[in-house]
Amino acid sequence: MKYIAKIWLLAMGVALATMAANATTLFKPVGRPPEVFAFNSATMTEPLTSNPYALNSPKVYLIFLGPDWEQNGMPIPAVNSMIADAKEILNSPYLSGLKQYGSDGIATYAGFTIDTSFDPSTNLSFNPVWFETDRILSNPTFSSWNPPPGAGNARTSPIYVVVRYGGGPGGSNDHGPNQYTSRAINVIDDLIPSADSVDWFSWVLSHEAAERMSSGIGGLSEVYPDSGGQIADGEPEIAFYAGRLNGRNGPLVTSYWSVLDQAFIIPDGSLQRILQVPIWNATSWTGKCISLQEGSLYEIAPPDQKTLIDNPVHSYAISSFNLTVSRGTTHIFDLTANGQVKEYSGSGNGWTRVTGSNTTASALVATADGNLYMLAANDGGPYQIWRYNGSGTNWTAVTGTNTTVSAIAAAGAGMYMLGHNEGGDFQVWRYSGSLTNWTAVTGTNTSVSAIAATAIGDSLYMLASNDGGPNQVWRYNRAGTSWTALTGSNTSVFSIQATGDVLSMTAARNGEGTRVWQYSLDSTNWMPLTGTNTSVGQVVVQDGIDLYMVASNDGGTLHEQVWQYDGTPYNWTALTGMNTDVSWIYVGTNNRLYMNAANDGGISGNWIYDGTPYRWTELQ
């Protein structure tokens, strides 16, 4: 067994992320549409470059209110556990995702106190959070806790967390001065069922701290689907999109909305980006998610139950409203590395094969109306598109043997293919829903290279040129042959990729070298993910979320390396050293990452990545 073992730390060029970088677990929005936020009344389509209202590096003080927090004059064990969890959350990368909202994503634990003079479980005639915060800050013993003198607004103030029992779990956050106080302060209400509810304490704290720091003293607010909501509200509460930091014994935290990822995120400090797709039956969450990780398909019950259900897996599809089976019941299918399609029983590793032994499939998608389609060949014949009939191994061909199909995509309820008939040019076609009837949605003057789809707006994209012009990225307007160009004549586009629910491209703009870009969801605006000193040769996507590239820095051509994106623009981690010259990479049908490369000027060979930077196994 051989490994590429030389470690090289990049001193310049692409910003280097360490193993503790801003990687993340992502929860795909499923129960409701993606969230839309506005900053200063303008819809956010990309991260904020500045925000004069968000909180930066606040100190966090915990105020435990109630007699149950002490026993024999000493804090109960739960208090110590809660303090430890608060420290762990604040010292972790969890808040780093707030940088996209203009915060620095940093907060520090500063101290705690216990006030046993009031019982928060009784009906109080005053607001306990504001009353208790003012009460503590008015005590000379806590003079060091006061906001800085003359600061003027709460943006420079600490965050005071009043922890109380007798309700919830739930909480709120706000800032002053307001009708309760003349102080420019930030407060959080951390309401939990009982004094020993450690997990609920950390869940509420993470929720409210993320919201308090991003909202700051104004400017940021959700406009859809919950008007006035904050970044941890909505689907993560309606369902339970949560996790634990640092393994099963870590503090319980909630996820919060990421404009950059168009998903709910938990930054967790690991390099790998993990996409969890919640499983809903009609309008109810089942309590489980599906996640594909390096070819292994897992069923996950947040926050910490993870069960391997199949391996090796190429891809999977979730059909929630299959009209040929029970409406509203979710069905999970996967496409295995050897080209089989199977349906999950819903427990353990129980699967039922739904394709025959003579069928080999290469792609599997489900449309929003519940129909399941595959691209497959029988007995070595031509690849056709097939629709599942809902039982056994019964499929119906929806393309003829005279149609050559290179790709399929599902956007909303629409089923699309990139194909041609009997030697014609590749075009994009939409399925009519009947027999083998398809309608071309591109004209004969359009030459299409690739298609991709995301759930945002049920969007279909293509890489195409008109009348021999340059390749551009286009978004389908879901009517006739109407498409909107998302790149201009100053941009040469070489590839497009759907990564989670965002679109990326490799392209050269304004005479620069080839870079990786992410679409900002607005007009022709794209965010660069690599710097101008980086020349990108190839980009691939693993597990539908992890982005890798072959690239060199500062004009270098002899040593192209493999890099992995950590989810933050410009932050990539080298997976190979300077002694390795990489020719190409690809993701196999088993969803493992492979490369062709030579070490120290030797002969090129094929290698498989083992998930740790610089560690590859040579294939004999």
Image (cartoon, rainbow, N blue to C red):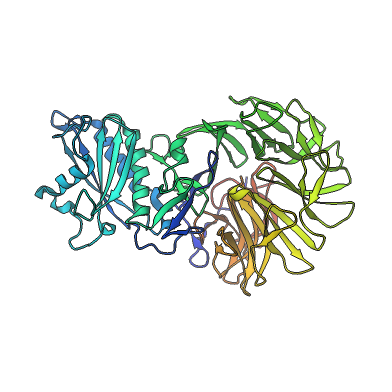
Above-or-below relation of 437 to 341:
below
- The residue sitting at 52% across, 31% down in the picture is 284
Rendered image quadrant of residue 283: top right
Q: Which residue is at the front of the view, 322 or 13?
A: 322
- The residue sitting at 57% across, 64% down in the picture is 525
- The residue sitting at 78% across, 43% down in the picture is 432
- Residue 380 percent across, percent down from the top left: 86, 39
Question: Which quadrant of the figure contains the N terminus?
Answer: top right
> Image check: 23 left or right of 166?
right
> Image check: 450 left or right of 135?
right
- The residue sitting at 54% across, 67% down in the picture is 531
Q: Which residue is at the front of the view, 266 or 220?
A: 220
Is residue 549 in sight in this rendering?
Answer: yes
> Image check: 597 left or right of 300?
right
- Residue 299 percent across, percent down from the top left: 56, 32
> Image check: 207 left or right of 470?
left
